[in-house]
Image: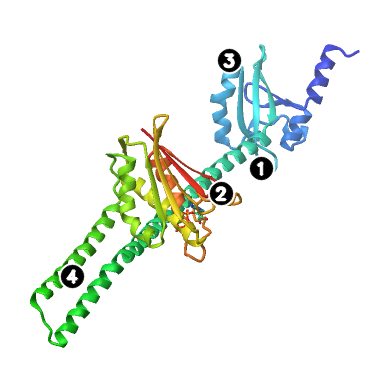
Amino acid sequence: MLKKVEWFEQLFNNSGVGIFIVDRNRKILEVNDALCKMFGYSYDELIPQSAEYLHVSKERFDNFANIAFDKVLNNESLNLEYEFKRKDGSHFWVRIAGDSIESNHEVLWTVTDITQRVEVEKEIKYLNSRLNLEIKEQLTVLREKDRQLQYQARLAKMGEMLSMIAHQWRQPLTAISATTSYMFGKLVVDEFNRDEFIDELQHIEDYSKHLSKTIDDFRNFFKPNKQKEYTTLETIINTTLDIVTPILSNNNISVKLDYRCNETIHSYANEIGQVVLNLIKNAEDVLVEKKIQTPTITIKTYKSNNSAIFEISDNGGGISNKIIDKIFDPYFTTKITQDGTGVGLCMSKTIIEHNCKGSLNVKNEDEGALFLVTIPL
Ligand SMILES: Nc1ncnc2c1ncn2[C@@H]1O[C@H](COP(=O)(O)OP(=O)(O)OP(=O)(O)O)[C@@H](O)[C@H]1O
Ligand SMILES: [Mg+2]
């Protein structure tokens, strides 16, 4: 059976917590094994030295009197995190608590090594700042990718516009050239007829006007107009059809229209027009590539659940289930040989979902793919 004093002595020496007692002049009176181990000193090296031995510097030791020692002497209990110095000069973090010993003007300090926790915290802080930095870097990369995508989309749009203009110019240009050859021929054989020549010149002028109108139509259609307008789906689709019909008829593709919406919408008409164009061009591409017998594009509009909806479908055989989840991804294309950029559907989805707050979805029907666009009213 231990006596009370022995019991306290046991506790003092076997505790895992470092303990030291100092007098009012901050001279070390007693230390336990744990404290010696923590600081790397032997018992005799510490007693009766000044507690300055344990502090990082003389300034800190002096300062500690103000922030801790005096308070504890005045019976305030104290518990704080503090940096000490080992015998080998290395610094480490502890949690230190102090209590005054009644009437003796002595202070008992208990010290727990928290280096590991502080290191972990430091590591977490460092990882956090790295993470922040990495997120910032990734954001910059994403922004750059987005910018490139927009740029590619613009290029693709310009390419599309040029090929459509070229297509629509071919016929009037051929006609102008045929007319001028005819007139030259007549001049060479001296069969100049004034009235006939005036007629032919009139034709040339009409063809030129047509050429210039085509340019204006395309310019208006592709103008980056970021203003919302009051319009209807039907108007937007008709404007787009004006532009693509010559190419569609050239490929014998017929367009079936079923208009049942006729609601006024307040949205980005030009941008929606470009989505319509992308969807029609995709339908045309598949119909031409697969050499479909009676190639048909069907466009329907209707109203449902307070939304204006249009569907564009074709009889081109649909989209394989293997790729249908990827077709809206940037740069996804199966048109490697036809120079597909794979940005058409991605940009269309952005326009509809981001700018118009609607949705763009796809499904396969019996004869081909069906794209469904919903614009909230
Ligand atoms: N109506 C459709 N029928 C079958 N497949 C389609 C249809 N529409 C799109 N796809 C598939 O989705 C892919 C992606 O289309 P998207 O318009 O994004 O790019 P693209 O048409 O390949 O290239 P770009 O539009 O730049 O010419 C196409 O390559 C095609 O495989
Ligand atoms: Mg496309």
Q: Nearer the viewer, mark 2 or mark 1?
A: 2
Other residues around mark 3 within 10 Å, as few (<14) / some (14–19) / many (≥20): few
Could you tell me how far apart the alpha carbons at marks 2 and 1 are, in whole angstroms?
A: 67 Å
Which residue position is annotated with label 4?
Answer: 204
- Secondary structure, mark 4, is helix
The yes-or-no answer for disc 3 within 8 Å of ligand 1 is no
**Could you tell me the amino acid type at mark 1?**
Gly
Mark sitting earlier along the chain (2/1) = 1
What is the distance, in whole Å, between disc 2 and disc 4 at their CAs? 49 Å
Q: Is residue 171 left or right of residue 340?
A: left
Cβ atoms at labels 2 and 4 below 8 Å apart = no
Query: Closer to the N terminus: mark 3 or mark 1?
Result: 3
Q: Marks 3 and 1, how far apart in space?
A: 32 Å
User: In the rendered image, which residue does mark 2 sit on?
Assistant: 324
Q: Residue furthest left?
A: 194
Q: According to the image, label 1 marks what residue?
A: 89
- Dot in front, 4 or 1: 4
